[in-house]
Image (spheres, coloured by chain):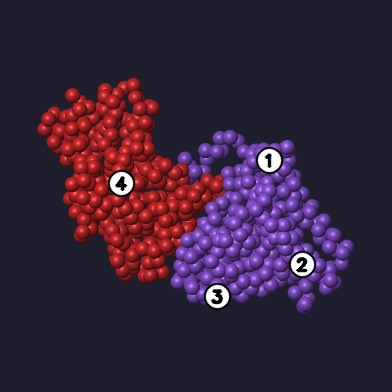
Chain colours: A purple, B red
Amino acid sequence: MSETGENLLLELYRTMYKIRTYEETLAKIYYEGKSPLFDISAGPIPGELHLSTGQESSAAGVCAHLKPEDGVVGTHRAHNFAIAKGVDLKKMTAEIFGKATGLSAGKGGHMHLFDPNVSFSCSGIVGASFPQGVGIGIAAKMQGKDYVSVAVGGEGAANQGTFHESLNLASLWKLPVIFVIEDNSWGISVPKDASTSVSKISERAKAYGIPGVSIDGKDVMAVYEVAKEAIDRARRGEGPTLIEVKVYRLRGHFEGDPQLYRPKEDLEEAKKNDPVLFAENQLLSKGIVSQEQLEGIKKDITDEINEAIDFARNSPYPEKEEALQNVFAGGE
Amino acid sequence: MARKLPMHRAISEAIAQEMERDPSVFVMGEDVGKYGGIFGATTGLLDKFGPERIKDTPISESAFFGGALGAASKGMRPIAELMFVDFFGVAMDQIYNHIAKVHYMSNGNVKLPLVITTAIGGGYNDAAQHSQTLYSIFAHVPGLKVVIPSNAYDAKGLMISAIRDDNPVMYFFHKGLLGIGWMPSPEEAATEVPEEPYSIPIGQAKVIREGKDITVVSVAKTLYEAKKAAEELENEGIDVEIIDLRSLVPLDKKTVVESVKKTGRLLVVDEDYLSYGMSGEIIASVSEEIGDQLKALPRRIAFPDVPIPYSRVLEQFTLPSADKIISTCKQMIK
């Protein structure tokens, strides 16, 4: 591995470790005030919480190529892409806590994160991201700019009509859109082989005349390489690419999901393919960092996360009347 | 100098002038290019602006309404056409869950200045999937502005306002008012239209006929039925005031309430379905404010709660008409 490659792996690892630690921290906080029963609206983090634990590499590998003006439209499980895209961590955390200092002052919540400063958005509706990513591509092309967009969906979303419409349109109009399918094998409780007609979703790209690539997300460097080619291609005006990243869902669909539908072996398999551990082992075994340096890196990241959590915890809730504001731009 | 234009030409002129003024305005939809829009709203625009700004799309409403959202979020001002309002189902998620809500969910940090144009209305035997009005469904969802012009002058001014608005605006045009070749339109719907751009504020109703005995509230095509009825009723000594709402969201309650205060009677005429819709909303709004001042119980004439039938006999029986307005007004006044 070259010098640059080494630095790169370390950078990607930092992003992934940040996502992992952030979500593990959220998961702990999520259960505060909920015991003994699982009460969805109690505790500091209300509502549903969908964590992307195990899916860090898709976000880190793709977003490493993106500039702030490049768009990312994420899913309901989007903390990985939000963090990798550089969404303000404090404001994002405050939003998830429903606080006035949040990205949207508590009006969006964890499935509806909007940070126009880094052109990030996401949606709670499966398959909704694809056409919106197409729209960002339309804007780039019409404005004569070289920004690109990344539209993210799960393997379940790839069976929605929006997926097919969007691939067709993006291909037809040669738009700078990268469709990223995070295949974690599970649409809530339904396994991919019971929902999806092909084993590799990337094969569907052929039907729309665009490149399609499937890649194992265990190795973030591999994701990085594939994403580089697709994004460079998009910036050159050569149109969209479909990238399917095999990721591993290390937790349930939502926090509190007992996962009774999931065979034990599936989770064991997922743990074996943990992309964060894989990168960590590479860093150590190749001597890119020492154990000591690694601890230092982890501590810096943990401190940053704790700072964001403290910020969210200590922030005020919004004024009640705020609920009636911002339905329309310019008042009412 | 003002010339007379049919409504569809007034709309396409408004779009053309805004496209000339602002390079971020563009049009997307099915058959908006060479065809000029199935209802003529984009007539001549392809020749003027080319296929990059007048985009014929595949039959993929989800993709291009989501596309309008994405483009608007990056500073463009798209106009996307949903050919018939009846087709909203295939794209509704992008409209009501996303286009309507993103501004609110982002606490105002994301603006979506886009226009959705769509054709409404029956009366021409196109049956249940091509004749609905449905504006109340969209007016029900917070975050969408809803405008419905009834004549060429308003159509141009409201289109310019809709394009310049920083919010998503649903712009409904009634097929029977546009003045297109295959669809007869009341002569008065084609009006004098100034050549220069002008705007009409969204959310301002208009009194189109003054009267002292009863207020008839409506939008779009049924207004012309109300006008016919008013002429008849005048012969019988009943003086009808007619209000054209022009916008359902925001709703100009003030103009309606002021009128009903004067006349003491309210009849709402609506081509949309009867239940849970515009007619109920107007009557409730007025009743809440001045219900105790009414001289008669408020009434409504709307499309009965059945899908639009095909046969001419059946459809004409179900549509609001001048005759129905005349007899209801008489009952309310006697």
Taking A6 as reference, is B186 left or right? left
Residues behind callouts 2 and 4 on a single chain: no
Q: Earlier in the sequence, mark 1 or mark 3?
A: 1
* Marks 1 and 3 in Cβ contact (< 8 Å): no
Q: CA distance from mark 4 to mark 1?
A: 45 Å
**Place of residue B64 in the rendered image (x, y in percent of width and height, measured from the top left):** 44, 61
Q: Is residue B235 above or below residue A330?
A: above
Task: Name the mark on residue A38.
Answer: 1
Taking A225 as reference, is B22 left or right? left
Q: Amino acid at mark 3?
A: Pro
Q: Quadrant of the N terminus of chain A?
A: bottom right
Task: Name the mark on residue A279.
Answer: 2
Q: Secondary structure at mark 2?
A: helix
| Residue for badge 3 | A211
| Residue for badge 4 | B307
Residues behind callouts 1 and 3 on a single chain: yes
**For discs 4 and 3, the disc positioned in front in the rendered view:** 4
**Place of residue B300 in the rendered image (x, y in percent of width and height, measured from the top left):** 28, 34
Residue A149 seen in the current view: no
Q: Quadrant of the rendered structure where residue A225 is?
A: bottom right
Q: CA distance from mark 2 to mark 3?
A: 27 Å
